[in-house]
Image (cartoon, rainbow, N blue to C red):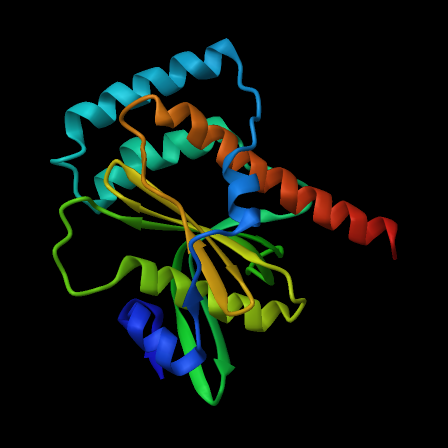
Amino acid sequence: MKTFENWTIGELYHSFGLEQVEEMPLLHAWLSTEVPYSETEKEQLTKLKKKLQQNASMWNEDELKFFFISPFIAIVDLSSSYYKAFTQRVISTKLNDIKLSGVVDFVLAKGIDVPEKPYFFLHEYKQERKGSNDPLGQLLAEMLATQTLNADNEPVYGCYIMGRFWFFVILDATKYAVSNAYNASDDDIFQLISIIRAVKQKIENKLQNKNINK
């Protein structure tokens, strides 16, 4: 058993057959979705963008979460009657007789007091992190565990952050795709809000359809 933070891309490839693909229509459709935002939200995002420009190279991980990611998520507004946001929660499962377990930074999932069916992960790293951990490997290990737990053959969505740079990831069966970096300290921040709101819509549509078909 290894915790999520100790997995690398190479180890996931050899242990579970994960394969990166250059083109994935699901990822392209997700990233190209345009979801509107108000003028008030644009002003708030512009202030956040400037704050990140000034501090991205100096903030540690907790400061990045507190001063940028948290207010950004508040603007996006991920509240819903269909799921909840959870932070610092344990997810654990077994795949191919290997235990996948660890604490996830942020996840949207069904559940009341614990995440029961995760849909989207946000994995946070400070920009200057020089450790040996592989942020993409850690995120994919979390997503792979979730895919196993959910057992519904649905793709899993995720994102990892390194300072000002955001990377979006989809895991579909054993294939995954990763976006180019979005720079939250420039005008990419306005596309970021569309991307996160788009995944919110995907979750809600999926759960609404399930309720209708019951």
Residue that appears at 64% across and 43% down: 202
What x and y, as percent, mark residue 9?
A: 32, 68
Q: Quadrant of residue 15?
A: bottom left
- Judge left or right: residue 100 versus residue 124: right
Question: Between 41 and 35, which is closer to the camera in this rendering?
Answer: 35
Is residue 46 visible to the viewer in this orientation of the structure?
yes
Question: Between 208 and 111, which is closer to the camera in this rendering?
Answer: 208
**Residue lying farthest bottom?**
97
The total number of labels drawn is: 0
Residue that appears at 43% across and 86% down: 98
Question: Between 112 and 9, which is closer to the camera in this rendering?
Answer: 9
What x and y, as percent, mark residue 141?
A: 40, 68
- Judge left or right: residue 166 versus residue 114: left
Residue that appears at 79% across and 53% down: 210
Q: Is residue 133 above or below residue 71?
A: below
- Judge left or right: residue 86 versus residue 71: right
Q: Is residue 151 above or below residue 44?
A: below
Q: Quadrant of residue 90?
A: bottom left
Q: Name the quarter where the N terminus is drawn.
A: bottom left
What x and y, as percent, mark residue 66?
A: 30, 37
Residue that appears at 53% across and 31% down: 77
- Judge left or right: residue 168 versus residue 154: left
What x and y, as percent, mark residue 118?
A: 56, 58
Is residue 7 visible to the viewer in this orientation of the structure?
no
**Residue lying farthest top?**
39
Q: Name the quarter where the C terminus is drawn.
A: bottom right
